[in-house]
Image: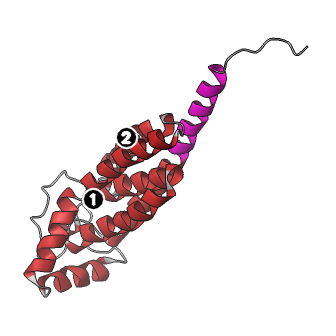
């Protein structure tokens, strides 16, 4: 079956919102735009740092470490699932089909738009961190929202791309972290010391 949006042009309901955001970006101070671009490019590193802190806090508190150690795998699996969907849908970037000038250079043809991988990764990491460490989750959740918003601000994605990415990432993050916790519980149970019969 031919990819549905391979030759997509204007016509998404949020075209106007995307265009309005990109215009606003060009009327905002260079310092703000530069900060948002930097965050959009490198902000995912914050989630890696938070995962290291989560491991350290779990170790210091004597909590099970397997769910925390599984967090990078959760994020990688969420990214791979997102990339499969992205390749199947093949939605062109909005900066390729709308008469706008994005803040950052427009990605080349073949670098598809739906869903936003950045939003998927950020949401999966935030939900996974929330499930193992609420304090770090409170940091990761707004960071994920800011990451998603930054992708629209710089012109890389439609709003629906990042909203879908946040939803997919949150669902995958929750399911995969739950699975990691189940494995951790099973592993701890299997390794529990065997007791003799009660006398």
Residue 161: image x %, image y %? 34, 64
Instruction: Kindly identify which residue carries mark 1.
Output: 113
Is there any visible trace of residue 100 in the rendered image?
no
- In the picture as drawn, the residue positioned furthest to the bottom comes out as 27
Residue in front for this viewpoint, 11 or 125: 125
Q: Is residue 180 above or below residue 166?
A: above
Q: Residue at x 61, y 35 (%)?
A: 182
The span shown in magenta is 175-191
Q: Earlier in the sequence, mark 1 or mark 2?
A: 2
Rounded to the nearest angstrom, the CA distance separating label 1 from label 2 is 23 Å
Tell which of 198 and 42 is nearer to you: 198
Q: Is residue 132 magenta?
A: no
Determine whether, in the image, residue 69 is placed left or right of residue 25. Answer: right
Q: What percent of the width, then of the height, locates residue 121?
A: 35, 52
**Residue 176 screen position, x and y as percent:** 51, 42
What residue is at 19 percent from the left and 74 percent from the top? Answer: 98
Residue drawn at point x = 11 percent, y = 85 percent = 29
Q: Is residue 183 magenta?
A: yes
Quarter of the rendering occupied by the N terminus: top left
Residue density around tag 2, few if under 14, some if 14–19, many if 20 or more, within 10 Å: some
Q: Please tell me whether mark 1 or mark 2 is closer to you in this view.
A: 2
Q: Are marks 1 and 2 in contact (CB under 8 Å)?
A: no
Q: Which residue is mark 2?
A: 72
The dominant secondary structure in magenta is: helix
Secondary structure beneath dot 2 equals helix
Image location of residue 172, percent across then percent down? 48, 48
């Amino acid at each position: 079956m031919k990819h549905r949006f391979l030759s997509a042009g204007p016509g998404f309901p949020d075209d106007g919102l995307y265009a309005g955001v990109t215009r606003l970006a060009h009327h905002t101070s260079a310092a703000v735009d530069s900060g948002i671009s930097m965050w959009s490019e490198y902000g995912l590193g914050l989630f890696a740092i938070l995962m290291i802190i989560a491991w350290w806090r779990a170790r210091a508190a004597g909590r099970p470490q397997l769910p925390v150690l599984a967090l990078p795998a959760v994020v990688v699996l969420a990214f791979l699932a997102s990339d499969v969907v992205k390749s199947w849908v093949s939605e062109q970037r909005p900066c390729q089909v709308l008469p706008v000038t994005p803040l950052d250079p427009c990605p080349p043809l073949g670098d598809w738009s739906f869903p936003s991988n950045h939003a998927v990764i950020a949401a999966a990491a935030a939900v996974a961190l929330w499930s193992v460490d609420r304090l770090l989750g409170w940091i990761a959740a707004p960071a994920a929202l800011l990451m998603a918003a930054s992708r629209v601000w710089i012109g890389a994605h439609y709003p629906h791309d990042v909203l879908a990415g946040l939803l997919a990432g949150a669902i995958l993050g929750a399911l995969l972290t739950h699975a990691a916790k189940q494995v951790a519980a099973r592993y701890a149970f299997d390794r529990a010391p065997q007791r003799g019969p009660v006398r």
